[in-house]
Amino acid sequence: MGWRFGESTVVHPLPIGVSRRAGEGEAVLAGDAIATGTIYGTPVRLSGARRLGLAPQDLARVMRVAPGAEVERGAILARTGRRFARAVTAPFDGRIAHIRADGDIELAPIVDRWVVRAVIDGTVTSTSDLEVVVAGEAWCLQGVAAYGPDAIGDLALLADGPSDEIVPSRIDVTQRDRILVGGGRSGPEAIARAHACGVAAVVAGAVPAAGLRAIFGDDVSAHGQVLRGDAPTVLCLAGFGTSALPESLYSPLRVFAGSRAAIHTASARLFVFAASEAAAIPATSPSLALSTDWGAVRALDGRVTIEPDVRFASEVLASGVATEAGPVPATNVLPVGAAR
């Protein structure tokens, strides 16, 4: 499956510490905050009932702030008396994490705050402290792998054809917050420059595996997992190494240039928010094949046939796809979009 227009569902996982999340049935646009929350540090134990001269079970009636609430530094957590008052105050900004059985208060400091934004225009179909699910209509193109955070921006083509690479010299600060698209290979130099210029994301036919390790570290995997917080967003449409996208995949990108788009890295999908009649898509989806040296991905153009028994150079007898350039093992051929 290549390009398609229709309803897609996107699952947005939420970190721990949700403060607010969108309600079911709420309409959202890509880029809207659908959940916010706080990251807390190790709780600090504050003397509560003992400081106030109370029994532990009596602390609840003098609490000024409910457990789980966020407080600012200096806020009164509990207080007794009038003329000769005693009080427990917050020594720092934080959240009341727990009231202990002995009457002490555990206050967790606020380390950071997070925001989860929608990556598709649509309606919230399900919401919980674990995830927010949004369903909406958009053009969708399934890639092979994606890295970095989700990204939203306007599409901008940096390649003149489906086999052209993204070159660093064509990237500058005027493309800030845009999603740059190339047809062929994107090297680590171009990705690093794009990230430094504030580009939202880079979409390419393929990225060399060594280049991905140089940017994201040795822990990067083909599943798109990346452990660094400040990392560029990269979407590989076809694979790794080098690639030339099929014209049927690249030509709609020319039409969509300038349109709002988003990348959901967890599912490696590119969403484009354009009218359903904006692009004409062929009825049959293209297929991709690995080159003979396994170092590149190429489109299967022209007439191809299936041969059940082909003896390859490795002396292995297996099913193959006959092309003008020679047979290709059938296991090395994949319909576009069938990876996920």
Image: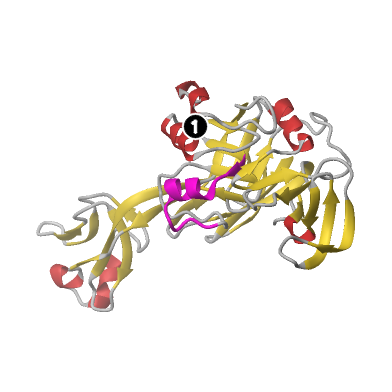
Q: Position of residue 326 (x, y in %)?
A: 80, 49
Q: Report how many numbered discs are placed on residues in the image.
A: 1
The residue nearer to you, when weighing 37 against 72, is 37
Q: Which residues are magenta?
A: 205-221
The residue nearer to you, when weighing 63 against 98, is 98
Q: Is residue 260 left or right of residue 225?
A: right
Residue on which the image places disc 1 = 199
Residue drawn at point x = 49 percent, y = 24 percent:
169
Residue 26 shows in this picture: no
Q: Is residue 311 above or below residue 155?
A: below
Circle 1: residue type: Val
Q: Is residue 331 above or below residue 233?
A: below
Rate crowding at label 1 as few (under 14), some (14 to 19) or many (20 or more) other CA atoms within 10 Å.
many
Quadrant assignment, res 298: top right
Q: Position of residue 283 (x, y in %)?
A: 89, 41
The residue nearer to you, when weighing 248 against 176, is 248
Q: Position of residue 184 (x, y in %)?
A: 64, 36
Colouring scheme applied when the structure was drawn: secondary structure
Residue drawn at point x = 26 percent, y = 67 percent:
106
Q: Position of residue 270 (x, y in %)?
A: 65, 42
Residue drawn at point x = 52 percent, y = 58 percent:
221
Quadrant assignment, res 17: bottom left
Q: Is residue 263 left or right of residue 289?
A: left
Q: Residue furthest left?
A: 84
